[in-house]
Amino acid sequence: MQQESVDRAALARLAEDAGVELPKAAVEPLAVYLELLTRWNRVMNLVGPHAWRDIFTRLVVDSLHLGPFLRRLPLPAAPLTWDLGAGAGLPGLPLRLVWPDGGYYMVEVREKRAIFLSNALARLDMSATHVFRGTVEHFFQGQCCPADCIVSRAFMPWRELLDLVRDRLRPHGVLVCLALEPVPDRLPAPWRCVDRQSYAAAGDGRWFWALSPDKPA
């Protein structure tokens, strides 16, 4: 597979232009991830964009906005987080470069994407970050305790997602949805919105929803 080199200085400038914080220590591993993704993408069609700059602007920026959003949520110091339908590692892998808190499990049923995730993790040497290849239902069956946080990006329609994860969160746990629309004014009981954020990426409006099935304390 042919390698596309990522200009590290250009990557840092792109992050600055996008209005996201990219620590200096994260520039190199993020560049390595983008090089891996562009190389594998030519063969496996993991994501829509093919040039690393487009992948960053259209897809990675979400992860870099998500880190600060998660830090302001009422999560424990070392939360257990599940990323359902992790795909090619978006938002998970770039997110872990800027938000390494707790344990993070990326769940992906598609074999090629799971293989890519495992290879990327081996290169990036991320602590407490794991890949589960299989269905979400099988993943749930193997867990001894519920999650503090569940992250989902286009895994399934949000109403179905609420039903799926309701009993998989710890008390006061949160479901974080990456969405292309604002959170609805009314959510099915017992869900409530505990936080939200809007931002722009690639010229489009995007949103984070942080939802909890628990009543306020």
Image (cartoon, rainbow, N blue to C red):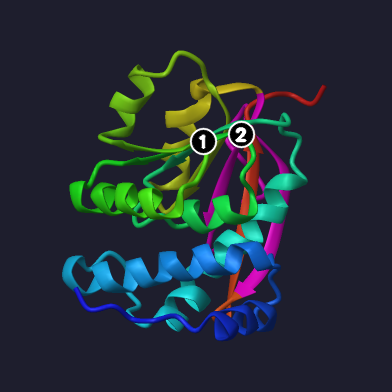
Judging by the rendered image, the residue that carries numbered circle 2 is 102
Residue 42: quadrant of the picture: bottom left
The relative height of residue 140 versus residue 13 in the rendered view (above or below) is above
User: Which residues are the magenta region?
Assistant: 172-200
Decide: marks 2, 1 in contact (CB < 8 A)?
yes
The three-letter amino acid code for the residue at tag 1 is Ala
Residue 30 in the image, given as x and y percentages of width and height? 51, 66
Q: Is residue 147 left or right of residue 112?
A: right
| Residue 183 lies in the magenta-colored region | yes
The tally of labels here is 2
Residue 1 in the image, given as x and y percentages of width and height? 19, 73
Residue 138 in the image, given as x and y percentages of width and height? 28, 25
The relative height of residue 110 versus residue 15 in the rendered view (above or below) is above
The three-letter amino acid code for the residue at tag 2 is Gly
The tag on residue 128 is 1
- Residue under the image location 22 percent in, 78 percent down: 2
User: Is any atom of residue 45 visible in this view?
Assistant: yes
The relative height of residue 74 versus residue 87 in the rendered view (above or below) is above
The foreground one among 149 and 88 is 88
| Residue 21 lies in the magenta-colored region | no
